[in-house]
Amino acid sequence: MRTPTIRDVAKRAGVGIGTVSRVLNGSTQVREETRERVLAAIRELNFSPNAAARQLSGGRTFTIGVVTPFFTYPSFVERLSGIQEVLDHSEYDLVLYSIRSQAQLQDRLRFLVGQRRADGLIVLSLRFDDEDLRLLNPDLPLIAVDNDTIQRYPRIVIDNEDGGRLATEYLIAHGHRAIGFIGEVTDSAFGFTPTRHRMHGFREALAAAGLAYHAAWCRLVSLDQESARQAAREILSQNERPTAFFVAMDMLAFGVLAAAEDMGLRVPDDVAVMGFDDIQAARYLHLTTVRQHLIESGRLASQHMLDWLSAGHLGQENQQIKLPLEIVERATV
Amino acid sequence: MRTPTIRDVAKRAGVGIGTVSRVLNGSTQVREETRERVLAAIRELNFSPNAAARQLSGGRTFTIGVVTPFFTYPSFVERLSGIQEVLDHSEYDLVLYSIRSQAQLQDRLRFLVGQRRADGLIVLSLRFDDEDLRLLNPDLPLIAVDNDTIQRYPRIVIDNEDGGRLATEYLIAHGHRAIGFIGEVTDSAFGFTPTRHRMHGFREALAAAGLAYHAAWCRLVSLDQESARQAAREILSQNERPTAFFVAMDMLAFGVLAAAEDMGLRVPDDVAVMGFDDIQAARYLHLTTVRQHLIESGRLASQHMLDWLSAGHLGQENQQIKLPLEIVERATV
DNA sequence: GTTTGTCATGGAACCGTTTCCGAATCCCAT
DNA sequence: ATGGGATTCGGAAACGGTTCCATGACAAAC
C-alpha cells in the first residue's frame, strides 16, 4: 500500500487538507474536537509528513549544516559533539560537510547555498577568503566557531594571544627561564591562525618577564604527533636546551612527551610540557594544558543558531562571544 | 531577484524544461549542441537545482543517515570519519543521528523512515530489538557496523571472541599465568555485546592453556576511565593479584594504566595491560592492544551503501563481512 | 514516394506539503 | 430576530523539480 499523504488523512478525518496541515503545524485556528479527529486519523494511518514536500513548499529544510575541516584532529569532534547535543533536542537535523581543501570549500559552499540544503551553517575553524564570502547568501544564517575572520557574522572564539600569555606565565611562575615553543606551521591547508596568536602571546609574556626569545628553541611543524616528536628531539639535542615547552596544540604536545621519553628525560623534572586545547586524550596523558571549552563552544553555536532561526533574526548579527580559558594543572609542568 | 528555476534556464536557452532536466541528469538523449546551450544558460544564471524539489519529484534524498550512539567513545568517531571520507566523493550528504536511549532510537527510526529523510541508513553498534526492526521500511537500504544482531541486513563485523582469544594468548605467550579482565558492563544503555564475546574468548584461551579463571580478578564496569581505574585498583590491592590485564576496550585500559601508576606499579614489569580497539589515543599511551580497523569499517560500510544505492539492490542482502584483527605490539605488555 | 524506426524535444501531470483567500459557521450584543 | 465580528474551515495555487507521452524531424529501407 502507498504511504499515506495528507490527503488520505484529510479524507479519513472528514476534513480539508488545510486543516490537517494546520494540525500538523500546531496552528491554534483549529477547533479542539477537529484537532482530535485529525490526530486520530494520523495515528490510524501511521502518517508522517514527507520532509521533501514540506521543504519545497515551506522553504525550510529543518537542517543545519556543519562545515568542518576533515576531522583528524580531536578538537573538531568535541565541538561537534556539543553541537549534536543541542540539535538533538530540536527539530533540526545535522548534516556534516568536511572539507579537505580550499577548492573543496568553495564547491561545498556553492552547493549548499545554491541548492538550499540547510537553513543555517555552523562553520568550524575554516577560514573564508573574499571569494568564499561572496558565495554566501546574505540571508543564510551562519555562525563561526574558532574563527574571527568572518567578521559579518556572529562568532564564538577564544583569545589565543591571551591563552599563549597565560600558558607562558604559568611556566615562568614555575621557575622556568628557558622556554621553547612548538606549534603548527601556519600556512597549513586549513589556514588556521591560532598558532600564530598563541605564539604572539608567548613572546609577549617572555618579554614582560625580561626573558629572551630563543629562536633555536622554537619550531613550527605540520599537524601530527611525529613531526612534533622529531622537532622536540632536535631541539633537546642542542647543547643549550630549554627546560620547558609551550606547545600550541595538545596533539603536538603528545609528540613532545614522546620525544622526552625517547631521550630518557623525565617530565616534568628535566623538561616541562604545557599544551593547549585540553582535548580528551590530554587527561589520559596527564598533560598540563590550557583548556578551551570545546564542547561548550559547540553547544553555544548551535543554541545561537536555533535562536536565530526561530526568531528570524539575531540581536547583534556580528556579535563576538569570547569563551574563557583556564589552566588545567596536571602532571607535566 | 528570485533565484532562478529550471524554467528560467529553459527560457534562456530556448528549450523546454524537460531538456534542461535531461541535461542536469546527464541523459544521453540530448544533442550536443543543445546541451551546450543549456549549460551556458545554467552558468549565466548561476542556476543550481533545488534539492527539495528534486527530492520530492524524484523520490531520492541524496542523503545517507548515520545512526550512532552518542559519541563520547572515540571508536564511533573513527568509524564516522571513514564513512565521511567515502561519502565525500559521492553525491550523498551525511546526516548524523546520535542516539542516547532505546526510546530515542525508536523515535528517530520512526522519524527517519516515515519522513523519508534518507536513502539509506548506516547503523553503528546500536542493537535493534524486534520492535525497532518492525519500524524499518523493508525497502530502505541499511548496513550495520559492529553489530550482527540485525540479521536481515549486510553487516560489517569483527570476531570479538577471536579477538579476546588472540589477546589472551598473546599475554600467555609472554609468560603471564595470572590474568585479570576488565570490560564494560554488558547491559549498558546501548546494549553492546562485544565485551561479552571478548570475555568469552578470554576464558576459552585461559582454559586451552590450562589456566584457571579467577573471578576476583575480573570486573565489568561502566564505560569511563574512572570506573576502570577504581576497579583495577581494587583488584591490584588484593593479596594475590594478576600480573596482567586484558581490558576489553582501550579507554578502560587507560584507566587501568592510571591505576597502576597510582599504586606505583611499573608497566609492563609489574602489571601488563592489553587493550582492545586501537583507538587513536592508544598510540599516544603506547598501549599494546588488539587493532580492529575502525576507519576501514566506516569506509567499507559507506562503499557498500553507495553500491547498493546505485545498483538498486545488492548481491547478498544479508552478507556478513568480517574484518581482520591484529595485535599491535607497543609498550604495555 | 511511402513506410518504418530512431532520435531529440516540448510540456502536462505529478510528487506532498504550506499558504492564503474566501466562505461558512458560531457567538453575542442589540 | 438580526447584524456583524471572530473563529473555523476547505481547497486552489504554488513550490521546483522529474517523468512520460506525444510530436516532429530525419534517415534508412522498401
Image (tube, coloured by chain):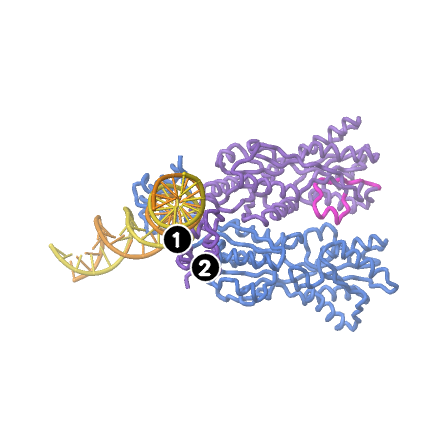
Chain colours: A purple, B blue, C yellow, D orange
Above or below, B234 relative to B48: below
Over which residues does the magenta segment extend? A269-287
Dot 1: element: loop
Percent from the top left, x then y, of residue B177? 81, 67
Percent from the top left, x then y, of residue B260? 82, 55
Q: Is residue A90 left or right of residue A216?
A: left
Of the numbered discs 2 and 1, the one sitting upstream in the chain is: 1
**How many angstroms separate mark 2 from mark 1 (CA)?**
13 Å
The residue positioned 51% from the left and 50% from the top of the image is B93
Q: Chain of mark 1?
A: A
Badge 2 and badge 1 in a common chain:
yes
- Foreground pick, B261 / A89: A89
Label 2 neighbourhood size at 10 Å, few (<14), some (14-19), many (20+)?
many
Above or below, B4 relative to A45: above
Dot 2: element: helix
**A160 in the magenta segment:** no
Q: Quadrant of residue A224?
A: top right
Label 1 neighbourhood size at 10 Å, few (<14), some (14-19), many (20+)?
few
Whether residue B19 can be seen here: no
Q: Amino acid at mark 2?
A: Ala
Q: What residue is disc 2 on?
A: A41
The residue positioned 71% from the left and 61% from the top of the image is B184
Quarter of the image with the C terminus of chain A is: top right
Q: Amino acid at mark 1?
A: Gly
- Foreground pick, A73 / B103: B103
